[in-house]
Amino acid sequence: MAGHGGRSRSGGRPTLEEVAARAGVGRGTVSRVINGSPRVSESTRAAVEAAVAELGYVPNTAARALAANRTDSIALVVPEPETRFFAEPYFSDMLRGVGAELSDTEMQLLLIFAGSDRERRRLAQYLAAHRVDGVLLVSVHADDPLPDMLAQLEIPAVISGPRSAAETLTSVDSDNYGGGRSAVEHLIGRGRRKIAHITGRLDVYGAQRRVDGYRDALRDAGHKADDDLLEPGDFTEEGGRRAMETLLSRCPDLDAVFAGSDVMAAGARQILRKQGRRIPDDVALVGYDDSAIARHMDPPLTSVRQPIEEMGRRMIDLLITEIADRRPPASHDVERRQMVLATELVARTSS
Amino acid sequence: MAGHGGRSRSGGRPTLEEVAARAGVGRGTVSRVINGSPRVSESTRAAVEAAVAELGYVPNTAARALAANRTDSIALVVPEPETRFFAEPYFSDMLRGVGAELSDTEMQLLLIFAGSDRERRRLAQYLAAHRVDGVLLVSVHADDPLPDMLAQLEIPAVISGPRSAAETLTSVDSDNYGGGRSAVEHLIGRGRRKIAHITGRLDVYGAQRRVDGYRDALRDAGHKADDDLLEPGDFTEEGGRRAMETLLSRCPDLDAVFAGSDVMAAGARQILRKQGRRIPDDVALVGYDDSAIARHMDPPLTSVRQPIEEMGRRMIDLLITEIADRRPPASHDVERRQMVLATELVARTSS
DNA sequence: AGGTACTGTGGGAGCGCTCCCACAAGTGAT
DNA sequence: ATCACTTGTGGGAGCGCTCCCACAGTACCT
């Protein structure tokens, strides 16, 4: 078939039209069956399904996308170079959650790295072409222009860690404040008196919140504020080492350290060892993330667990809702959602 | 515009037609400019490009895919659970090469895991719908039905390690035979006499070829064959430990071990240490892959480097050629290509 | 002068869907 | 019987492109 003007087509995949002919119904009816519309009689549905099976019909995604103006795919945008993506268990946990939640859907996930300028430009093109129905944003820094670009293009998006308390995008986060608090309360409960904190990068909102939790826990326990016990890190092992050295020289009598990440705790541990401090006898150590590092450290590291996989799942939920909400012209008063999931302290022998 | 029957569209993205009107040319001409056809005069091209820039025109991928019957995207199919994907540096290196080579293109890469049955079924649907122009297959086992499915659907595909010497798909591989050989020759050159080999999974063709290289190197050096020195592993650390234990009990006097992967070498090292054998003094150890593990082992591990990133790049080259070759009705006598890249022994202190 | 060839261009037809309008047939209240 | 719905269905129009045919214009032979 295919009129005289038509080009030769590959493999002759069956079309809706052909399925309709086979089932003895109209095109519209087949479409309804394929898309699970309830407005089809039971017998017709059965006939169509039989025809679909017999012909091995699979809908043409491009045609559907063109007609319906949707792509049925979403992007997970990682504004980091690939190396970090593989190095940090955070991303793989997140991806697992996202994948799991998505497997119930017909949605396709695209993994997009936007670490370099070049990749950023590509991504911008990609989004401008509306090649995805929605975007999942992870690990975004406070000054990243990406969220605004998404807002401008009116592309539904969910962000994994809000950029600030005033985050405009729908977001999913873990309770960093509570996590910081629980780490410190745990140390206080173990009788520690002089508790230092190696912070994460302070342009990351979550890191700030952990500091807030640390401060409040100390205050509520009647400790007086002492900023000498606070030293900024940058989430790296090297940063952990540097911060630990600084802290020890400034406050040689500290008896506990709460590190803003397991990786930094690993760095701190090295310095403590080198300076002959025993863990936990002389100095108790608590990390954050409960990653593999924590379990394999010597001694095993007490750490604050974030439900990262769960966060991934929730992000998908929210994003799909957001996409669905936006289909009818625009009911636009969907309240912005900020979901916060609880953290959990996992006590091990380092504290 | 958009006739009375039209639905309201999102954001009013400009179309080809609008660009054409603006530039004062026909639709076909704009299409030609967009697609880089040479049959356009310089002045017209400039006018169209100006109009494109002014309107911020970005082609609609779905429309293009529908009309041209191509998707401009390819899939990297990983027939493994995600966990292994993140655990093994092999994949991230490969992905880096693939990404790099693809960044010169307009092609989009999809990362698809097909570890579980469920994911397999999804993938089958995906391929049946021809949602990608081509497929990159990595880490495929000998009995995997995936390659045949791709052949059946006539989807261009390139495989990263051939399944056998008679691989029908276009393939890219590293010289496993030469790699195995060079490891053994290196050990012989260091004066080792009793060289054992912990193999990889023998249903992986590359692992077999390493064994062949091991055997031939020994034979050519005048050693007599001794299968007691050969013990199968499975590429895991645990497998490395088991194999090493078996080997030590069977041949307590061995003085060198060639492991089919760095991870297995790490397992073997643990056992050697536990049994009081010094590396390299008592037993020399050589791994395969030259991964991060090799560099960080104590002592640093001599290992055979595979150019994995390069393999990724070559795979893309071959796949793109294959896709292009298949566009005209079918010139079908493109000879199957089996590309083999050289390996390189990286000597460190473990041997 | 006529033929032949090429270059650049416009626009019709068609890709395979979804959306929606129109309408037949059935159901129940008046 | 009439009217007002409801349910199920068919098919036109249109999504925004690419492909290709037709044709004007120019150039270069006979």
Image (spheres, coloured by chain):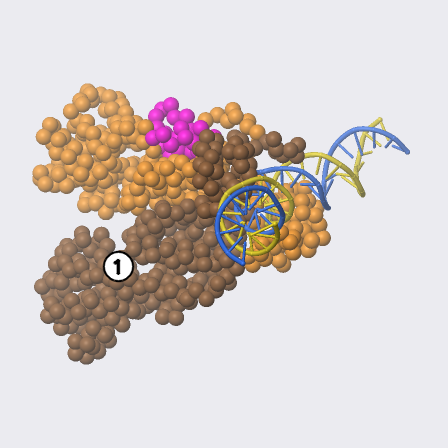
Chain colours: A orange, B brown, C yellow, D blue
- What's drawn in magenta, residue-wise? A144-171
- Rendered location of residue A313, percent (x, y): 43, 40
Badge 1, how many Cα within 10 Å: few under 14, some, many 20+? Answer: many
- Rendered location of residue B64, percent (x, y): 52, 45
- Rendered location of residue B323, percent (x, y): 45, 56
- Rendered location of residue B2, percent (x, y): 61, 33
At a point 19% along the width and 33% down the height, the residue shown is: A257
Residue B250 vs residue A112, the one in the foreground: A112
Q: Is residue A343 left or right of residue C6?
A: left
Task: Give the letter of the chain under mark 1.
Answer: B
Picture quadrant of residue A10: bottom right
Q: Is residue B308 left or right of residue C28?
A: left
Residue A289 vs residue A33, the one in the foreground: A33
Residue matched to label 1: B306
At a point 41% along the width and 46% down the height, the residue shown is: B106
In the image, what residue type sits under mark 1?
A: Gln
Question: In the displayed structure, would residue B19 be above or below residue A6?
Answer: above
At a point 22% along the width and 69% down the height, the residue shown is: B181
At a point 13% along the width and 63% down the height, the residue shown is: B351
- Tag 1 secondary structure: loop
Question: In the displayed structure, would residue B74 be above or below residue B212?
Answer: above
Would residue A149 be counted in the magenta stretch? yes
Q: Is residue A90 left or right of residue B303?
A: right
Residue A85 vs residue A112, the one in the foreground: A112
Image quadrant for the N terminus of chain A?
Answer: bottom right
